[in-house]
Image (spheres, grey):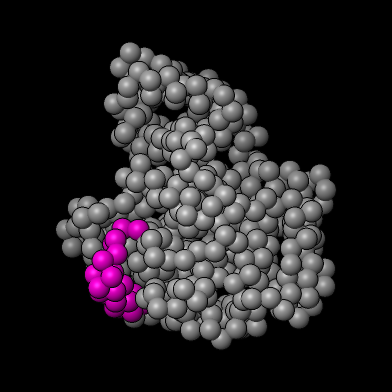
């Protein structure tokens, strides 16, 4: 290993399922990394190596590390990763930090598996709802994320990467209460509300002498550079796109807790409620709690009013709002998961993957946030609530892309802000909600100048 201009050149041995490969698998892995997937692998690898760096601009990260490269080197006993000009922060005394090396291996594993076994395999029909769900199941199973022997205990925690210290401390307190009750944590794997619950649960698991605590992080290539995996994540899975990432969350979760956040959190809320509004899911127990510290009353009131206005009273019945009470949040979630376990026992359902949950195609098909697609979104009240939820979710997804994803940032620089059009009865409160995210610095990390990537056209 040697260091040049503050970057490090080295060879790294992958871990986990990549340690033992057949010669054919090695050939395919090397071929995949060279033919069409190199840019994807480079971007995700750089994100993992930048763990702990204070930025959420994926385009800036790529520009600051333009000399970084990664290459798969074939050897008789498997493969090694050749890193050129890798960020020095990923190394201590010349050796890569163990957790970062594990995350790097997970990135390679998932990108190669998706390319070889999902996207270029006729077995999976990615235009069919059941085919998409089957593909998600296989990606998670290949990553070892489905634990057949464990009772329901996985809580998905959503919330913003750009939050205040008070909000961050609160997420830790909630995670601590969950961990004391033996519950595991799954998040989007990044900083802020994605890190806090894991940190709190990690301490609680230590108190309870739980040595196999799970801190599952689920990301996707477009967002991982802006939300690098936090150090506590001990299982990392990279899904192909945001829609499959969201479906992976809701099918592996036994309950979901949402903390305050910005456009990405609003996207997650609209996705979840849109799915739960499907009449086929009416009888499914699915605990959902919105929570935050004392100063989050107004935030959740605005979210609650927006949901009532757009999706109706039925949507409001699918969640509870508990403010400034971590212990009550944990007790309520624990009780809800007990109901989930009993329901699945009664119906002979798997504990580790929610096959019964009905997800409409509108929530599964990838949405490309181009200027044309954003402008053509159907945002009006005279449509079924789950369809409106799907289109509102796409609007927020486009805003996330324009805020932090390299491709979205470049599109905004070239063509100006996205224009979001719709009925004024919805667009006015949507505009107010987005403006509150801006004023509360929820769109970008504190200290960053935010220029809106969108315009609301009423």
Is 322 situated above or below 337?
Answer: below
What secondary structure prevails in the magenta region? helix
Q: How many labels, in total? A: 0
Q: Look at the image and tell me whether residue 86 can be seen.
A: yes
Is 238 situated above or below 198?
Answer: above
Query: Which is more toward the observer, 221 or 271?
Result: 271
Residue 140 position within the rendered picture, expressed as x and y whole percent measured from the top left: 38, 48
Looking at this rendering, what residue extends furthest in the left direction?
A: 209
Segment colored magenta: 329-353
Residue in the picture at 36% in, 37% down: 102
| Quadrant in which the N terminus appears | top left
| Quadrant in which the C terminus appears | bottom right
Query: Does residue 181 belong to the magenta stretch?
Result: no
Query: Which is more toward the observer, 376 or 161?
Result: 376
Query: Does residue 352 belong to the magenta stretch?
Result: yes
Residue 27 position within the rendered picture, expressed as x and y whole percent measured from the top left: 43, 19
Query: Which is more toward the observer, 396 or 250?
Result: 250
Quadrant hosting residue 207? bottom left
Residue in the picture at 74% in, 63% down: 377
Residue 376 position within the rendered picture, expressed as x and y whole percent measured from the top left: 78, 60
Query: Which is more toward the observer, 118 or 190?
Result: 118
Looking at this rendering, what residue extends furthest in the top direction?
A: 76
Residue in the picture at 55% in, 70% down: 274
Residue in the picture at 69% in, 69% down: 434
Q: Look at the image and tell me whether residue 223 can be seen.
A: no
Residue 221 position within the rendered picture, expressed as x and y whole percent measured from the top left: 54, 43
Is 420 situated above or below 314?
Answer: above
């Amino acid at each position: 290993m040697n260091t040049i201009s503050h970057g490090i050149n080295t060879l790294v041995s992958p871990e986990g399922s990549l340690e033992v490969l057949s010669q054919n698998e090695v050939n395919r892995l090397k071929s995949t990394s060279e033919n069409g997937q190199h840019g994807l692998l480079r971007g995700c690898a750089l994100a993992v190596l930048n763990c702990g760096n204070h930025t959420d601009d994926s385009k800036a990260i790529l520009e600051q590390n333009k000399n970084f490269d990664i290459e798969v080197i074939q050897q008789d006993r498997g493969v090694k990763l050749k890193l050129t000009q890798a960020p020095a922060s990923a190394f201590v005394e010349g050796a890569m930090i163990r957790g970062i090396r594990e995350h790097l291996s997970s990135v390679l594993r998932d990108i190669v598996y998706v390319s070889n076994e999902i996207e270029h395999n006729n077995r999976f029909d990615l235009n069919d709802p059941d085919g998409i769900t089957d593909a998600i199941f296989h990606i998670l199973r290949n990553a070892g994320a489905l634990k057949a022997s464990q009772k329901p205990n996985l809580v998905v925690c959503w919330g913003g990467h750009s939050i205040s210290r008070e909000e961050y401390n609160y997420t830790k307190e909630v995670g601590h209460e969950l961990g004391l009750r033996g519950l595991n944590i799954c998040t989007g794997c990044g900083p802020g509300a994605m890190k806090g619950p894991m940190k709190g649960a990690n301490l609680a698991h230590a108190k309870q002498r739980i040595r196999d605590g799970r801190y599952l992080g689920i990301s996707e290539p477009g967002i991982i550079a802006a939300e690098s995996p936090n150090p506590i994540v001990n299982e990392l899975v990279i899904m192909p796109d945001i829609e499959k990432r969201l479906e992976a969350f809701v099918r592996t979760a036994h309950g979901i807790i949402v903390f305050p956040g910005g456009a990405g959190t609003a996207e997650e809320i609209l996705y979840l409620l849109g799915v739960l509004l499907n009449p086929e899911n009416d009888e499914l127990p699915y605990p959902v709690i919105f929570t935050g510290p004392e100063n989050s009353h107004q935030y959740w009131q605005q979210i609650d009013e927006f949901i009532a206005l757009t999706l109706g009273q039925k949507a409001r019945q699918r969640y509870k709002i508990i403010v400034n009470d971590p212990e009550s949040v944990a007790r309520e979630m624990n009780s809800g998961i007990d109901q989930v376990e009993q329901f699945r026992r009664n119906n002979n359902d798997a504990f580790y993957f929610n096959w019964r949950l009905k997800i409409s195609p509108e929530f599964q098909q990838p949405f490309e946030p181009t200027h044309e697609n954003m402008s053509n979104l159907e945002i009006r009240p005279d449509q079924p609530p789950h369809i409106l939820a799907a289109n509102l979710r796409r609007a927020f997804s486009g805003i996330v892309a324009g805020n932090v994803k390299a491709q979205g940032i470049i599109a905004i620089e070239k063509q100006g802000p996205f224009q979001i059009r719709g009925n004024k009865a919805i667009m006015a409160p949507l505009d107010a909600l987005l403006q509150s995210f801006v004023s509360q610095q929820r769109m970008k990390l504190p200290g960053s100048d935010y220029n809106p990537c969108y315009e609301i056209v009423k």
